């Protein structure tokens, strides 16, 4: 088993996960990730400073405002937003961050600075890919994305 596979399994085994970037509207990656994690039994917290609710649940302005400490964070924001999320993770001692990246042509949340901050602060970071490609049951679209990402070398290669 590769280091990335272990990190992905460990991340998805966590019970309390925050998803940064949850917003309003259809087709928002953070919303889809939030709903999938919620539907698979995780306790999830939506984070977005511009929202008070998301997907029918409370939405918090930052990680410090969450009602309980989380074990992991998915960052599905702009790369600059990801840097802010990682700084909050450092301050709060959150040990796992998954930085979302869609297929290359659809955008990324990955920031080299955020990845560096994670590594310097002993935060396990998955820099790219999408939790929905690994969170069972995986839908057909995300199975195809996982395959395509693997074939094109766009899955995270290291943590």
Image (cartoon, rainbow, N blue to C red):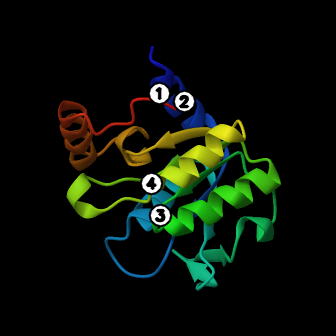
Q: Quadrant of the N terminus?
A: top left
Q: Are marks 1 and 2 in contact (CB under 8 Å)?
A: yes
Frontmost of labels 4 and 1 is 4
Q: Position of residue 122 (x, y in %)?
A: 70, 36
- Residue situated in front as seen by the camera: 81 or 11: 81
Tag 1 or tag 4, which sits nearer the N-term?
1
Instruction: In the rendered structure, find residue 7 and report the number of the disc placed on it.
Output: 2
Secondary structure at numbered mark 4? loop
Instruction: In the rendered structure, find residue 110 and report the number of the disc placed on it.
Output: 4
Task: Compute the Cα span from label 2 to label 4.
Answer: 17 Å
Q: Is residue 99 left or right of residue 149?
A: right
Frontmost of labels 2 and 4 is 4
Tag 1 or tag 3, which sits nearer the N-term?
1
Secondary structure at numbered mark 3? helix
Neighbour tally class for label 2: few under 14, some 14-19, many 20 plus, Cα within 10 Å: some
Q: Are marks 2 and 3 in contact (CB under 8 Å)?
A: no
Determine whether 47 is above or below 108 in the image: below
Q: Position of residue 117 (x, y in %)?
A: 64, 48
- Which residue lies under the disc numbered 3? 79
């Amino acid at each position: 088993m590769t280091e990335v596979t272990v990190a992905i399994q460990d991340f998805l085994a966590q019970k309390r996960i925050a998803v940064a970037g949850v917003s309003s509207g259809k087709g928002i990656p953070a919303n889809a990730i939030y709903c999938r994690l919620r539907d698979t039994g995780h306790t999830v917290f939506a984070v977005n400073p511009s929202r008070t609710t998301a997907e029918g649940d409370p939405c918090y302005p930052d990680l410090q405002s969450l009602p309980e400490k989380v074990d992991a964070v998915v960052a599905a924001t702009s790369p600059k937003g990801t840097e802010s999320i990682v700084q909050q993770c450092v301050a709060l001692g959150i040990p796992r961050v998954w930085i979302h990246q869609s297929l290359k042509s659809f955008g990324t949340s990955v920031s080299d600075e955020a990845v560096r901050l994670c590594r310097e602060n002993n935060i396990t970071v998955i820099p790219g890919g999408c939790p929905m490609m690994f969170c069972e049951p995986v839908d057909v679209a995300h199975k195809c994305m996982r395959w395509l990402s693997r074939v094109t070398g766009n899955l995270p290669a290291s943590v």
